[in-house]
Amino acid sequence: MTQRAIYTYAWDLAEDGVTAAVEHFRACELNTVTMAGSYHAGKFLRPHGRPGKVYFPEDGTVYFKANESDFGEIKPVANSVLTERDVLRELCDTPDLTVNAWMVLMHNSRLGAAYPQATVKNAFGDSLIYSLCPAGPAARAYAIALCATITRDYPVNGLRLETPGYLPFQHGYHHEFALVRQNRWLDNLLGLCFCDHCMAGAGAAGVDMPGLKSRVVAAVETYLDAEVDHADDMADAFWLADMVLDRDLTGLMRWRCDVVTSLVEDIRSAVRDDADIAVIPSVARPTGGAWYEGSDLAALARAAGGIEVCFYEPSVGRIVSDLHDVQRRIGDAGRIGAILRPGHPDLTDRATVAAAVATLTAGGVTDIGFYNYGHLRRPAMDWIADAFRGLETAP
């Protein structure tokens, strides 16, 4: 196994102390720390947090020292922790430790509110401020500069790129609320981007964007005016029918995949040559559904060198199925890494964590990470250690 990683945040490491945290990680058979270099907002319950248990991160900030002169229209916002210490630098200065920077790219409500012209615009012209549009030049330039500068200025081993594409309509914005029953058909239509850049780009690729936009508006308005709520299975069937029968919708989704792949290619070209890059294609379950976000798994693996899959499942059997499908789609395009959650709602006991690690390893996955140190109960760290020790003692 190459990387045994723990995902983590700067605030948890600062609270524990980098030296103490790394010692704990090593005791748990971990050799890699993947720390958020850029991140969005949240409300987090921290089982072993001190003194408080609930943490609200500063929205849309970076956790490394970035020079604004390296950026164009969209500038990064530094997290306040950097006024006291540079946790990423401390990690990188730790001997015999592999350090990755985990970069959340297009999911940024703070920057979306400050630069609405760079966000996804739905068919009604609403700016989805939590989602920067990967087709927009300003958003692309920001993502590329973010990745290039961190690999230039910090000796990180590599990057883990999250949300390089189009976010779903439901993606954890603050206090999302509706008195209309959500379903995949409605959510997917409301999440499509019809900003000027997507209108022009997809139009040049042969998609009738004005016509598609009009059909989406009519479909959503008709539904919202009707006395009907689509059941989940029916909504899935309606969305599939639209995807197959509306050539412009199909064309738009394929074009979105090309947009996201090209962004990852541009990032790969801009970062330090020896940096190890992997894309976290989606947290959609199963991973094959990542295509909605513009994630063509094989194309992303080729562009970056590999993908890191969120196997966020409650059983080993479901992990096996997802791995089988991902391997089928990727082939030899790039390597596959894994991320597991040893706790609710996924792997909720020691034996299941061990079985998941053993199964992934037997399936050829050499890099396994765990999400997320600050969110995990202390016993879960022992489960991780036991899982890796079990590999070493297995016949």
Image: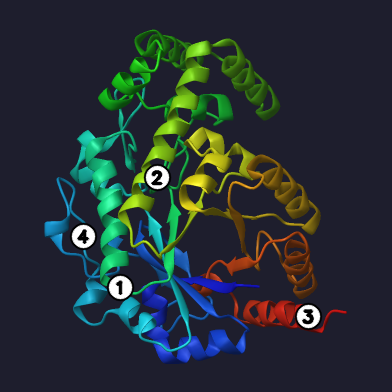
Within 10 angstroms of label 3, few (less than 14), some, or many (20 or more) residues?
Answer: some
Q: Residue at x 78, y 58 (%)?
A: 316
Indicate which label's residue lies in the foreground, 2 or 1: 2
Within 10 angstroms of label 1, few (less than 14), some, or many (20 or more) residues?
Answer: some
In this image, 63 relative to 178: left or right?
left
CA separation in Å, label 4 and label 2: 25 Å
Q: Are marks 2 and 1 in contact (CB under 8 Å)?
A: no
Indicate which label's residue lies in the foreground, 3 or 2: 2
Q: Amino acid at mark 1?
A: Tyr
Q: Nearer the viewer, residue 386 or 308?
A: 308
List x then y, in percent, for residue 280: 51, 52
Q: Residue at x 46, y 17 (%)?
A: 220
First of labels 3, 2 by sequence position: 2
Q: Amino acid at mark 3?
A: Gly
Within 10 angstroms of label 2, few (less than 14), some, or many (20 or more) residues?
Answer: some
Q: Nearer the viewer, residue 329 or 184?
A: 329
Q: Which mark is residue 390?
A: 3
Disc 4: which residue: 77
Indicate which label's residue lies in the foreground, 3 or 1: 1
- What element does badge 1 sit on? loop
Disc 2: which residue: 265
List x then y, in percent, for residue 320: 77, 53
Q: Are marks 3 and 2 in contact (CB under 8 Å)?
A: no
Residue 329, image quadrant? top right
Indicate which label's residue lies in the foreground, 4 or 2: 2
List x then y, in percent, for residue 200: 29, 19
Which quarter of the image is occupied by the C terminus? Answer: bottom right
- What element does badge 3 sit on? helix
Q: Residue at x 55, y 73 (%)?
A: 5
